[in-house]
Amino acid sequence: MNIPLFPEQASTVAKHVDALFFFILAVTVFFTLLVVILVALFAVKYRREKHPIAVPIHGNIPLEITWSAIPLAIAMVIFVWGGVIYFHLSRPPAGSMEVYAIGKQWMWKFEHPNGTREINELHVPVGRDVKMIMTSQDVIHSFYVPAFRVKNDVIPGNERYSVAWFNATKAGEYHLFCAEYCGTLHSGMIGKVIAMDPADYERWQSGGGGEGSMAASGEKLFLQLGCSTCHRGDAGARGPNLNGLFGATVQLADGRKVIADEGYVRESIQNPPAKVVAGFQPIMPSFQGQISEEGILQLVEYVKHLKAQTPGGPVNVAPESNSVPGATNLPNQQAPLTAAPGKK
Amino acid sequence: MATVAQVEPQFTMPEEHYINEDYGIRSWLLTKDHKRIAILYLISVTFFFAIGGLMATMIRIHLLTPTGNLVSHDNYNKLFTLHGIMMVFFFLVPSIPATLGNFLMPLMVGAKDLAFPKINLLSWYIFMIGGSITLYALVAGGVDTGWTFYTPFSSVYSNTHVVTAIVGIFFAGFSSILTGLNFIVTVHRMRAPGLTWFRLPLFVWSMYATSIIMMLGTPVVAITLSLVALERVFHLGIFNPALGGDPVLFQHMFWFYSHPAVYIMILPGMGVISELVTTFSRKPVFGYKFVAFSSLAIAIFGFLVWGHHLFTAGMSIYAALLFSLISFLVAIPSAIKTFAWTATMYKGSISYKTPMLYVFGFLGLFCIGGLTGLFLAAVGLDIHMQDTYFVVAHFHYIMVGGMVMAYLGGLHFWWPKMTGRMYPEAWAKLSALIVFVGFNLTFFPQFILGYMGMPRRYAAYPPEFQVLHVLSTAGASILALGYLLPMVYFVWSLRYGQIAGPNPWGATGLEWKTTSPPHKHNFDETPIVNEEPYNYTPELERQATFV
């Protein structure tokens, strides 16, 4: 029988995480053995039959300082090492391919920018940085792929999305777990991450696709909800111009400056008075509860695409304006796919 | 070992002691004697431990197969929730403080009783009310939030008896606040003449540090859980994001208590180990002041590390690094203590009595439990390990391998003082061995499971994890036997155990300078202390009939 004792290493970061693991393991084994061997040695050597009179020793300051300082030094090495890995893990590289995820009791829903939707399965290409932009529509969940050594909690109602990123190093199927207890079928909220060679991934992409790209769906919502009435893009508009907004710095009415990221767009839809743009009145109604999490993500994706065009106008799907950086080698990803319904 | 051939010591039970000074159920339920209250607590926490243990057994049986065949998913979730609630709030937190602490604190400082005997009795009643309410939540249908009550699951989504369980824990919390208050005042105000702070037994130091955490931390968890109950009942938007609340705020508030609570659970165990290792090595503790102050350092730094439970909950990078740094710092005092206990054995005169066997077990398991904390304090590594079985194994090594080992060691050590009779040595050694083997077999495989990625709180799991789960369940059945045996032979010894005499171990400490069991007022006359702690004199060597 095959009894695995160590998780597969299937992402670029896994070997770095494991290197630290083995270092701390060595420290653990060393100090545990040190104590156990000394205890055994003293217990035998100074047993009462052999050594009836104890020597009253009260302590030894230099020794005490030594055995405080050495563990402290080792602990600091581990701290820095762990911190470096964490820094790396917390910052998705620029140009990552983006995938949106929604956790709900008890399933994972994924949507690729081209509109491909998946449930409990996530297809990714090997060798690409993949950035997960995640939220929950009920309780806290946690996106966990042990083979990638990646985990992040997926939190409902946060003003920012949870982010995780990875770069798969070999093709295969890997466990996807929900790591934060979320109710009855917590242990059923599992799935697979399927890492594919780029060619296979392209084939898979061309076979999938939903009712159009996320941005196109977002555009429909934008018009349907009447957003375009105020967010018009001309000087007299009642709402700020969204053209080229994403990624830019926004001056708020209360003097703060924020970067317009996914979370900012989301919060501005759900809770508009929280961050009012300088020069505008807080007149926008809240859309909390009126748009599904999928809908908000589509709007976010739509806003990302509004680079230099009229809001409410057609989404420019020409390859050079696609906002998924580094995605140009995947032609099928960019055009809205109207063909076959999604794989799932 | 020549345990049987020991010279029969010529002792008789004292004519009058706290057990026989009055009879009848009223004399126990209305007692203000700290020793009797300790016995009430001992019976109560043993009862709650048995319930928590029964649930652990069911959890382990359920996990024998990947699909989990014993109970439904919902019932599995209730089992681990109530296992956690029972073990944390109704066993681990009160175990050593309320039983050994209650019994020993006045004796160790040479006082007649605790500073507030009536409050002490009140604390037991509050504890029992809390326990009863929680048991009611259990029989009424259970709770399925996990002992951590994470929002918004607990405050909005769960359909179980969350509020009832919270009320139960709320009560239990006040019982530990009152116990902490009593200990702090007792140590400050009621020490015998000559018993300066640095002559106090290290058990008293660790109980003092524990009491500080109890008094400062417990109100926070009481408030936090009350807010969850209020949000459930009145639909306030505190943690519920749909009403503008912040679910992660709950985690900060909860762990602000519950991380220090980890030290409420282990510090008393460290105090016990300090007493045991010196007695059975016949030597003073190596570096008394380092050990004493490291207890206080743990109590204080313990309040600054709660964020390490939230590394994956979306905190800022810099906050995570800061919490990581302080978590590494709090490990140092524990390292100091471990080295100090080991060094205490150097050139000692070591006997392998049952309490010392528990010390050996504690030292090994506490090393593993403590050092595996380093993995989890390293943020980059914790991302992978958070919420896996590695965490489960880590804190069971501290709580069960550390704390329960120390508790059992302490119970054996002070059993002759509490009852006047010795436990049966051979049986006790056997059960200590069984506990050690069973414990490691139960929890060591869980480290491997955890690093492989097995998440906590899963009622079903992928089949490749089964072998390790089966090993763990096998270990749990051995461990259960190791816990049942003492329950049997301790009861047996009440009638048939050898009469111990006042100081069977030839130990230092004022508790050994009175009869076993002590009479109602502990000492015939207030003892006067004129020597340093752990001063093993030839006179004590002569008394040490059982060492």
Image (cartoon, grey):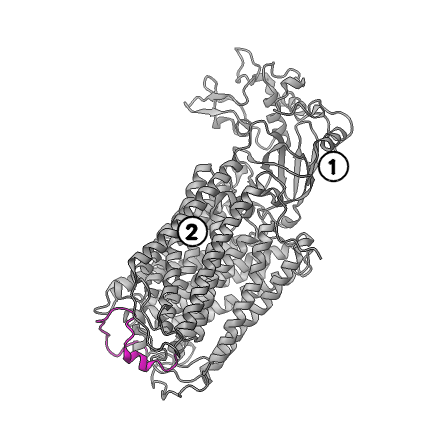
Q: Position of residue A166 (x, y in %)?
A: 59, 36
Asked where in the image residue A140 lies, by quadrant, the reply is: top right
Occupied quadrant, residue B70 = bottom right
**Which residue is labeled 2 in the image?**
B257
Chain of the residue that carries numbered disc 1 in the rendered image: A
Q: Are marks 2 and 1 in contact (CB under 8 Å)?
A: no
The x, y position of residue A135, in whole percent, is 58, 36
User: In this rendering, is residue B120 above or below A145?
Assistant: below
Residue at (52%, 69%) from the top-left corner? B435
Pointer 1: residues within 10 angstroms few (<14), some, or many (20+)?
Answer: few
Residue appearing at x 49%, y 80% in the figure: B426
Q: Secondary structure at mark 1?
A: loop
Give how far across and how far down residue A314 sits, in percent: 66, 16
In the image, is B291 to the left or to the right of B481?
left
Tally of numbered tags:
2
Q: Nearer the viewer, mark 2 or mark 1?
A: 1
B543 in the magenta segment: yes
Mark 2–mark 1 Cα distance, whole angstroms, equals 45 Å
Query: Is residue B470 within the magenta segment?
Result: no
Instruction: Please name whichever residue, A93 or B14, is drawn nearer the observer in this view of the structure.
Output: A93
Q: Amino acid at mark 1?
A: Lys
> Relative to residue A266, is residue B320 depicted above or below?
below
Q: Which residues are magenta?
A: B520-547
The furthest residue to the right: A340
The residue located at (60%, 16%) in the rendering is A311
Residue at the spot of label 1: A344
Quadrant of the image containing the N terminus of chain A: bottom right
